[in-house]
Image (cartoon, rainbow, N blue to C red):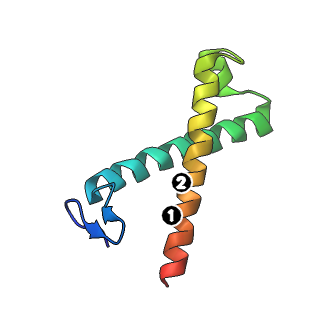
Amino acid sequence: MFAAGPQETKGGPALLTEKAMKILNIVTLVLLVVGGLNWGLVGLFGFDLVAGLFGAGSGLARLVYVLVGLSAVWQAIQLLRAISRE
């Protein structure tokens, strides 16, 4: 799958090692869980936990929303790669 160190590919050395990929996948999955739970709270109770913690429309709340969105894009790419390998 991924080498323990930088791996040579047609485009040059791989950008992320296996360990870095694992950490990135864990972080993005945690962010997706946070986002999913937040949307569940919004749907069930009309309560936005992120806005409650960081302030509605605050820079930090917006950053969390952007990171959750980027995490979804990253995981969608990983899913498509896994499907295409089969």
Q: Quadrant of residue 75?
A: bottom right
**For residue 15, which quarter of the picture?**
bottom left
Mark 1, residues whose alpha carbon is within 10 Å: few (<14), some, or many (≥20)? few
Residue 62 horizontal side relative to residue 79, left or right: right
59 sits to left or right of 27: right
Which element type, helix, strand or loop, lies under badge 1?
Answer: helix
Mark 1–mark 2 CB contact (< 8 Å) = yes
What is the x, y in percent for residue 68?
59, 40
| Residue 63 x, y percent position in the rendering | 58, 27
- Above or below — where is 24 with respect to 9? above
Q: What residue is shown at x 26% (from left), y 68% (from top)?
A: 8
Q: Secondary structure at mark 2?
A: helix
Is 30 situated left or right of 32 in this image? left
> Circle 1 sits on which residue?
78
Q: Nearer the viewer, residue 70 or 6?
A: 6
Numbered label attached to residue 43: none
Q: Quadrant of residue 57?
A: top right
Name the residue located 43 percent from the left edge and 44 percent from the top edge. Answer: 27
Q: Which mark is residue 74?
A: 2
Mark 2 burial class by Cα count in 10 Å: few <14, some 14-19, many 20+: some
Residue found 28% across the figure and 59% down from its top: 18
Q: How many marks?
A: 2
Q: Nearer the viewer, residue 23 or 51?
A: 23
Considering depth in this image, is 43 or 11 the residue closer to the camera?
11
Q: Position of residue 50 (x, y in %)?
A: 63, 26
Q: Is residue 15 above or below residue 32?
A: below
Residue 65 picture location, percent across and down: 63, 33
Q: What amino acid is labelled 1 in the image?
A: Gln
Which residue type does callout 2 highlight? Answer: Trp
- Residue farthest along the front direction in this orientation: 11
Q: CA distance from mark 1 to mark 2?
A: 6 Å
Residue drawn at x 57%, y 70% is 80
